[in-house]
Amino acid sequence: ANPNSLPNSLTNNVVATFSNEYYPAIVANNSGIWKYINNQFQSLILNGSYNATTITNDESNGLWFTMSNTSDNLVHYRPNMPLVFYQLNNVNALDIVDIQYTNDGKLWLALREDGLLQFDPNTNTTNLYPMPQINNGTGITALTIDANNRLWIGGGKGIAQLKTDNTWQ
């Protein structure tokens, strides 16, 4: 990316980045969601309206992101479709450190101190998987999904995998 193409609002406070075949580069920050196209960054959605905190994509090139300054703290963006807002009750978006989409259509949100929150957008339901003992005061710092669709989290004392029986290894 050409640094000269960065709008002033993208020169700091970047909280998440993402890219795939459909989106060469996506940047989330406290000014919205930005896409890199034609050698410059352009506002994709919510320019200046919301504080984006995490971002991921789904199988239909939709984007999911969390926001810290609204009660509807989870948003689904699909090209050429209206935004869909979800409210994750009792979840502060500032506590969400990462978000991942799995091929079963569910979202996983890494909560800094609480563990993993699974959200099913089809039923609008959540399940909390409490954090294992990998925390030394830093809480969860990372979330990823491997090629076998297994969830892994990282924290101050190492990593843990959520097994199919919903226990940590």
Image: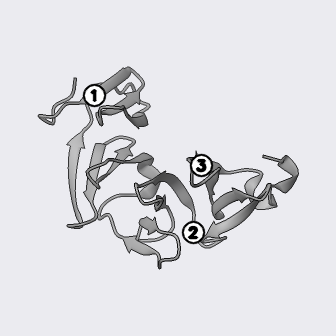
Quadrant in the picture for the C terminus: top left
Of all residues shown, which one is farthest toward the left?
165
- Callout 3: helix, strand or loop? strand
User: Where residue 15 sits: x, y (%)?
Assistant: 59, 48
Residue at the image position 63 percent from the left and 53 percent from the top: 27
Mark 1, residue position: 161
The amino acid at mark 1 is Gln
Q: Name above or below for residue 71 compared with residue 8.
A: below
Proximity of marks 3 and 2: CB atoms separated by less than 8 Å: no
Image spot of residue 84 (x, y percent) = 41, 74
Residue type at mark 3 is: Val
Label 2 sits on a secondary structure element that is loop
- In the rendered image, residue 58, in percent from the top left (x then y), is placed at 41, 55
Q: Is residue 148 above or below residue 115?
A: above
Of the numbered discs 1 and 2, the one sitting upstream in the chain is 2
State how far apart marks 1 and 2 are (Cα).
32 Å
Three-letter residue code for mark 2: Tyr
Residue shown at 63% from the left, 56% from the top: 29
Q: Residues within 10 Å of mark 3 (few under 14, many from 20)?
A: some
Q: Nearer the viewer, residue 71 or 161?
A: 161
Q: Which mark is residue 50?
A: 2
